[in-house]
C-alpha cells in the first residue's frame, strides 16, 4: 500500500449497497484524513470476497479477470496521484477522484472563489455584509491589476507575502470613493474578509495551505463617539429652526434612549410596541445585524417622541417613526451639532454609544443588563463601552474615598 502525504488507496466491498448475494466494489482514496469514494463499476459474490487481500477468491477465468481489473484500477489511481503531484496541482482525494473519472478540474483561482462565495452566500449573509465583500473584491482586483500586473491568480500561488503585499497596497492607497486613505481598522476588515474566503477555499478543498496561518489581524481600539450627559441635555433643549433638522434630532434622541441602530429604528413598526412584564410599554424586536431578540423598556423621553410622531404624514406601512436615509441623517446631524455649538463629530450610530455609556452604564445599570438591551451576543462587546465611562469611574471612586474617610482611624491605618 503506497503512502505519501498520508495518501492511501483502499479497495473494499460496499455491503451497504448489496443486492442479494452481490455487492459493488469501491475504492476509497484518503489524503490527510479526507476521503473520496469511487465505484469501480464491478460487483462480486459476497462469499467470494477476501477482506485481507481485497480481491475475489474465485479461481475461475472471471475471477482472475476481475482481480486483474482491480490491479489496473489501483495502478490507475496511483498514476493519477503521481501526475497531479508532478504538475504541482492541488492533490486532494477529490482531485484524484476527478482525474480518475475524467472529470479533472483546472486549479481554482481567487476570482473563482469570489464568484463562488457571492453565488452561495446570497440569502445567507445580510445585504450590507455582501456589499462589504463587493468592496473588498474591488480592492483585490485593483491590487492584482496595479501591483501583480494580472487579472487573476491561482489559489495555490497565494502565500504570506501576498497577504502582506495586499496590506501595504491598502495602506498606501486611497479609498475607492474618496481621496482619503483607509484607516487601520478599515484595512483589517478587508483582510478579515479575505481570510474568511481562504477558510472557505480550505473547506472546499480548493486550497491545501492557508496563507493567513502566520498572519495576525491588527485591529486598534478606538474611542467611540458619544454624547455626555451635558451634551445630550444641550441637544434635547436646543432650539432648531429647520423642521427637517428637528425631526432628525428627535429620531436621534429616540435612539439615545433605546440603544437601537439606524436600521433597527427604521424597521420599527407599531406592532413592535407592547406591554411588558411590568405593565409598561416595551419594544420587542430583533437586531437586523445578528437577529438577536431585543426587549427594551421604553423610557419616558423615547415614549414622548413616539407620541409626537404618531400621526406624522410621512409615516407609511405601519412604521413607528418617519426616518430619513442614513446619509441624510448624518449630514443633518453635523449641521445640528454646529448650530447648537456642541463640539463633537457624531453619526447616527453615536446614539447607540450614548445609550450604552451616558444613559445606562453612566447611571449605574449593570453591564450584563446593558448587554441584553443592546442585543450583544458577547459581554466582551459591551465591555468596550464600560472602559470609556470616565465620569462613572470618577463617581465610583469618589464614593469609595468617602467610605474610607468615614471609617474609624485604626481601620484606615490598616488599609
Image (spheres, rainbow, N blue to C red):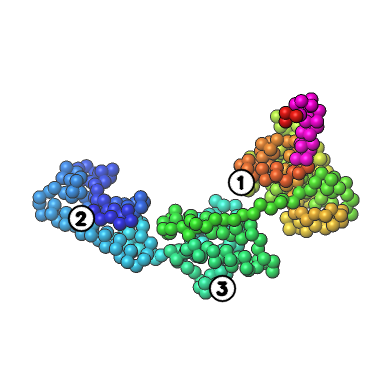
Residue 200 falls inside the magenta stretch: no
Count of numbered badges drawn on the protein:
3
Q: Residue at x 51, y 65 (%)?
A: 162
Q: Quickly name the residue at label 1.
A: 290
334 displayed left or right of 317: right
Q: CA distance from mark 1 to mark 2?
A: 53 Å
For label 1, the crowd category at 10 Å Cα-Cα, with few meaning under 14, some 14 to 19 and many 20 or more, is few
Give the mark nearest the N terminus, 1 or 2: 2
* Secondary structure type for disc 1: loop
For label 2, the crowd category at 10 Å Cα-Cα, with few meaning under 14, some 14 to 19 and many 20 or more, is many
Q: CA distance from mark 3 to mark 2?
A: 52 Å
Residue 103 point in image, percent of width and height: 34, 62
User: Which quadrant of the structure image shows residue 258?
Assistant: top right
Q: Residue at x 33, y 56 (%)?
A: 5
Q: State the extent of the magenta-drawn residues as a range.
A: 392-412
Q: Quickly name the residue at label 2.
A: 70
- Which one is in front, 27 or 350? 350
* Secondary structure type for disc 2: helix
Residue 31 point in image, percent of width and height: 34, 54
Tag of residue 347: none
Q: Main secondary structure of the magenta part?
A: helix
For label 3, the crowd category at 10 Å Cα-Cα, with few meaning under 14, some 14 to 19 and many 20 or more, is few
Q: Residue at x 25, y 43 (%)?
A: 15
Q: Is residue 267 visible?
A: no
Above or below: residue 130 compared with residue 19: below
Q: Quickly name the residue at label 3.
A: 146
Residue 403 falls inside the magenta stretch: yes
- The residue mark sitting in front, 1 or 3, is 3
Residue 281 point in image, percent of width and height: 75, 34
- Which one is in front, 407 or 191? 407
Give the mark nearest the N terminus, 3 or 2: 2
* Secondary structure type for disc 3: helix
Amino acid at each position: 500500500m503506497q503512502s505519501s502525504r498520508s495518501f492511501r488507496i483502499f479497495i473494499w466491498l460496499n455491503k451497504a449497497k448489496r443486492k442479494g448475494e452481490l455487492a459493488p466494489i469501491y475504492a476509497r482514496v484518503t489524503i490527510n484524513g479526507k476521503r473520496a469514494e469511487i465505484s469501480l463499476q464491478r460487483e462480486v459474490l459476497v462469499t467470494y470476497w477476501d477482506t485481507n487481500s481485497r480481491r475475489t477468491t474465485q479461481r475461475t477465468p472471471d475471477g482472475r479477470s476481475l482481480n486483474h481489473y482491480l490491479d489496473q484500477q489501483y495502478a490507475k489511481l496511483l498514476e493519477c496521484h503521481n501526475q497531479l503531484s508532478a504538475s504541482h496541482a492541488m492533490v486532494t482525494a477529490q482531485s484524484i477522484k476527478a482525474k480518475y473519472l475524467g472529470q479533472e478540474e483546472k486549479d481554482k483561482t481567487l476570482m473563482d472563489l469570489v464568484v463562488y462565495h457571492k453565488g452561495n452566500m446570497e440569502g445567507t449573509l445580510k445585504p450590507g455584509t455582501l456589499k462589504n465583500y463587493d468592496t473588498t473584491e474591488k480592492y483585490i482586483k485593483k491590487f492584482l491589476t496595479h501591483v501583480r500586473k494580472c487579472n487573476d491568480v491561482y489559489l495555490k500561488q497565494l502565500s504570506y507575502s501576498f497577504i502582506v503585499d495586499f496590506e501595504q497596497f491598502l495602506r498606501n492607497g486611497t479609498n475607492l470613493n474618496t481621496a482619503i486613505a483607509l484607516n487601520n481598522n478599515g484595512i483589517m476588515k478587508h483582510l478579515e474578509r479575505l481570510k474568511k474566503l481562504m477558510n472557505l477555499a480550505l473547506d472546499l478543498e480548493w486550497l491545501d495551505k492557508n496563507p493567513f496561518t502566520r498572519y495576525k489581524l491588527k485591529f486598534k481600539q478606538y474611542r467611540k463617539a458619544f454624547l455626555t450627559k451635558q451634551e445630550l441635555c444641550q441637544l434635547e433643549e436646543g432650539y432648531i429652526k429647520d423642521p427637517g433638522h428637528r425631526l432628525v434630532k428627535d429620531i436621534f434622541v429616540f435612539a439615545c434612549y433605546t440603544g437601537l441602530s439606524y436600521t433597527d429604528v427604521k424597521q420599527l413598526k407599531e406592532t413592535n410596541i407592547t406591554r411588558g412584564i411590568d405593565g409598561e410599554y416595551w419594544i420587542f424586536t430583533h437586531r437586523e445585524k445578528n437577529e438577536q431578540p431585543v426587549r427594551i423598556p421604553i423610557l419616558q423621553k423615547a415614549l414622548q417622541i413616539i407620541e409626537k410622531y404618531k400621526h406624522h404624514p410621512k409615516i407609511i406601512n405601519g412604521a413607528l417613526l418617519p426616518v430619513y436615509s442614513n446619509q441624510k441623517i448624518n449630514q443633518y446631524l453635523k449641521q445640528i451639532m454646529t448650530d447648537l455649538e456642541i463640539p463633537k463629530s457624531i453619526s447616527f450610530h453615536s446614539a447607540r454609544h450614548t445609550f450604552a455609556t451616558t444613559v445606562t452604564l453612566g447611571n449605574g445599570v449593570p453591564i450584563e443588563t446593558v448587554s441584553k438591551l443592546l442585543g450583544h451576543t458577547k459581554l466582551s462587546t459591551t465591555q468596550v463601552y464600560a472602559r470609556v465611562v470616565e465620569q462613572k469611574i470618577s463617581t465610583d471612586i469618589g464614593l469609595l474615598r468617602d467610605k474610607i474617610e468615614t471609617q474609624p482611624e485604626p481601620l484606615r491605618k490598616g488599609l
